[in-house]
């Protein structure tokens, strides 16, 4: 099986701020797409690259991650692998957390990780050198709690934070600068934040994506992964106006705060 350096990973911007991720092996025209919320940009990319789509992988049921599935399946024949706990159509194989799937004739092994919170049946997909986190873990942020509880989402994020630190994190949206602005309000003395902001701005100014990030980077800057740090807890308690009993309460306070947060104007 190829090591992770032999894999190619490309973000395809779709809709307003989503990314579909295309994963393949260098020199092989076959590719897999993750969360194709719009078929047209994916088909355009395939045509431009001379690539052939052989599978579609989904993290959760929201339309901005699934709306392209049917057309891509019809035009390429690529089957859909989707979370077993969610109603997603079309779906050729329902996958539960803990299951492993092999694609590209066994060259690509993906492990499904249950990450309830944003939605109840959400999955992250762990591959060689990367993890596709959908709307569970973002660069410097996390998804809103549309279906799950703070306890479930906190546990899901801690599960991701425990993965190997060098893993690339392939997120579902370009929210990085707004998330870093919130992180700087929560933890203004975090020495890792200025460099993270500069790096994201540099990539975006060059017309690229701010992603991928890494597990190490997220553990250093993401307040939702840093609920045990003193400055993060103090900020959450100041926001709540009371002592918070545990990290889940810190997380819940941060998530509600972020829901109401407006990044400062440039």
Image (cartoon, rainbow, N blue to C red):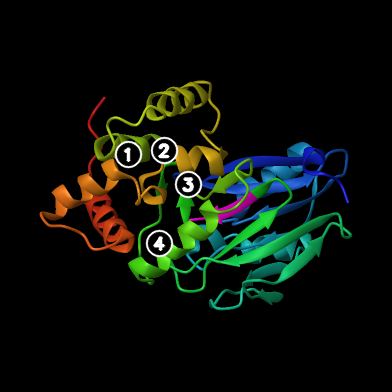
Front-most of residues 54 and 46:
54
Which segment did they paint magenta?
131-135
Vertical placement of 227 versus 145: above or below? Answer: above
**Lower sequence index among marks 4 and 1:** 4
**Lower sequence index among marks 1 and 2:** 1
Residue under pointer 3:
173
Vertical placement of 17 versus 188: above or below? Answer: below
The quarter of the picture where residue 7 lies is top right
Answer left or right for 159 relative to 250.
right
Q: What is the spatial separation of the Cα atoms under label 1 and label 2, in whole angstroms?
A: 7 Å
Residue under pointer 2:
221
Q: Are marks 1 and 3 in contact (CB under 8 Å)?
A: no
Residue in the image at 45% along x and 64% along y? 155
The quarter of the picture where residue 191 lies is top left
Name the secondary structure under disc 2: helix
**Lower sequence index among marks 4 and 2:** 4
Answer left or right for 21 relative to 175.
right
Residue 154 magenta-drawn? no
Q: What is the spatial separation of the Cα atoms under label 4 and label 1, in whole angstroms?
A: 17 Å
* Residue 228, horizontal then vertical, whole percent: 35, 51
Q: What is the spatial separation of the Cα atoms under label 3 and label 2, in whole angstroms?
A: 17 Å
């Amino acid at each position: 099986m190829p090591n992770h350096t032999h894999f190619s990973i490309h973000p395809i911007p779709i809709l307003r701020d989503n990314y579909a991720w295309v994963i393949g092996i260098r020199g092989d025209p076959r590719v897999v797409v993750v969360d194709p919320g719009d078929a047209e940009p994916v088909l355009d990319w395939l045509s431009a690259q001379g690539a052939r789509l052989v599978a579609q992988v989904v993290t959760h049921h929201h339309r901005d991650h699934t709306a392209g599935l049917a057309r891509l399946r019809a035009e390429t024949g690529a089957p859909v692998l989707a979370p077993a706990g969610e109603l997603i159509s079309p779906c050729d194989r329902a996958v539960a957390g803990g299951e492993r799937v092999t694609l590209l004739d066994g060259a690509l092994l993906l492990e499904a990780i249950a990450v309830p919170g944003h939605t109840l049946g959400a999955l992250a997909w762990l591959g060689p050198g990367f993890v596709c986190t959908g709307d569970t873990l973002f660069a410097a942020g996390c998804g809103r709690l549309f279906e799950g509880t703070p306890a479930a989402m906190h546990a899901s994020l801690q599960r991701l934070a425990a993965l190997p630190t060098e893993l690339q994190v392939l997120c579902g949206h370009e929210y990085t600068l707004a998330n870093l602005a919130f992180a700087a309000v929560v933890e203004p003395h975090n020495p890792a934040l200025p460099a993270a902001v500069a790096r994201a701005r540099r990539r975006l100014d060059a017309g690229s994506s701010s992603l991928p990030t890494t597990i190490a980077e997220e553990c250093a800057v993401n307040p939702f992964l840093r609920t045990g740090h003193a400055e993060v807890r103090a900020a959450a308690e100041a926001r709540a106006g009371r002592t918070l009993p545990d990290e889940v309460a810190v997380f819940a306070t941060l998530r509600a705060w972020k829901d109401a947060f407006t990044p400062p104007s440039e």
